[in-house]
Image (spheres, grey):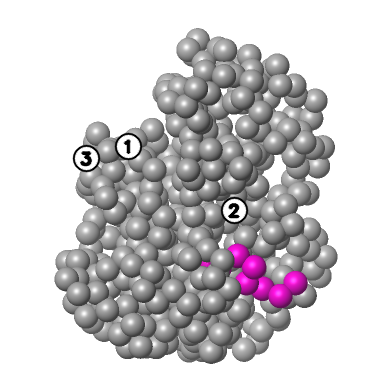
Amino acid sequence: MTKLTEVPKVSSKPDPRRAIEEGEGVLRLAPCWVPRSFLTPGRRLKLHPDDYYALGAHRGGIDERWLGSTTEAANENRGDDEGLSYVVHAGGRFTLREAVQQEGERIVGRAIWSKYRRWPVYSKFFDNLGPIPCHMHQDDEQAKEVGQQGKPESYYFPPQLNNTGNNFPHTYYGLEPGTTKSQVRRCLEDWNRGDNGMLDLCKAYRLRPGTGWLIPPRVLHAPGSILTYEPQWGSDVFAMFQSMVECRCVPWSLLVKDVPKGKDQDLDYIVDLIDWDFNTQTHFKDACYLEPLALVNSESDGFVDRWVVYGRIHGQQLFSARELTVEPGAKVAVKDAGASGLIAVQGQGRIGVHEMETPVLMRFGQMTMDEVFITHEAAVRGVVVENTGTEPFVTLRYFGPEVWPDQDYPNVSDWKKQPAGRT
């Protein structure tokens, strides 16, 4: 097996077409690391202990790995390419964004390319020692006021990366039914008095590996300390509503960073960023909680493909994800309805012509063999996935909008209908 010891330099003459052809429609990706200055890394991303602050302590610790991303991270003092995934080919690299711009239809499919002219989604591993502040993401209409797009998102908690739940494996979602706008407004008024009491208005749910959530925009949530796989829309807008978390102050600027000029002190405007009907509904969990759904009972053939993110947000199929497990010695030809970003989380194998291996420990700047992008043309043709190791080969792959026919796509509540004992 040929291994690269470091990520290659940027290609002077990127050739996405050749990379697609030589990879038989599957593109090799380099790891994409993103720091957050206001959070503490959970240290489950398999980075070397010396490398979690590789970008400098002033930038914060690395607590995210972005997957198949053409979306820039909205960080202060960021690098020009922060958040962008790179395709590695012929001893060099170029961004996945460049590849999509040049070979859009081949990579993301005609429907997505015609409507969006980009790969409009991405996923990430999100890994923190403790909870993060209660916040929400704007919808398209709100984000448009600051020249951005809205951000619905989803969560899945892969068991392979959650050997520990860290400090607070619970997440607050929505608001307690009956909560009023004046109560939230009071929290904003109390911003500089220490803990503004925002979490007193919310409800916490214990997080369990192997389950997930589907979260529309404008929904308050305070993610817990479990490592999360997050397929989401290609945007990085947010508004923090909690003024202090784990005795650390959250600056007002993180509440209003994506609020129009002149509205950054308008408390009524900020309170109305929240979707009040959705946040205060009585059966919030029923609307958002996910458990895996197997496509078919194929365990006797040595593999099982499960939905781990599914359902519609305000009637739209925006993104989805599946977890494929292939047992040692088995192989399967996987046909999907659209392109996907894929990451291996356990074992080793092959995906098409690409050898795959899940790393145990990585250095910052080192090349790995655990991530690829399956182009649309390869996905619909079919890609052979083979386990060449001695343990299960497990991958996660996420998809773009409106990929699946309605009859093949489950709703959030469909997990309740599966036979007892089936996952």
Name the amino acid, label 2.
Ser
Q: Is residue 361 magenta?
A: no
Mark 1, Cα crowd under 10 Å, few <14 / some 14-19 / many 20+, is few
Range drawn in magenta: 395-406
The residue that label 1 is drawn on is 76
Quadrant where the C terminus sits is bottom right
Residue at image coords 75%, 21%: 180
Residue 382 location (% of width, % of height)? 53, 88
In the image, 151: left or right of 342?
Answer: right
Given the image, on which type of amino acid does mark 1 rest?
Glu
Distance of mark 1 from mark 2, alpha carbons?
A: 25 Å
- Which of marks 3 and 1 precedes in the sequence? 3
- Residue behind mark 2: 154
Residue 18, image quadrant = bottom left
Residues under labels 1 and 3: Cα distance?
13 Å
Marked residue nearer the N-terminal end (2 or 3):
3
Q: Report the front residue among 65 and 15.
A: 15
Q: Position of residue 238 (x, y in %)?
A: 51, 38
Q: Is residue 403 magenta?
A: yes
Do the numbered discs 1 and 2 sit on residues whose CB atoms are within 8 Å? no
- Disc 3, SS: loop
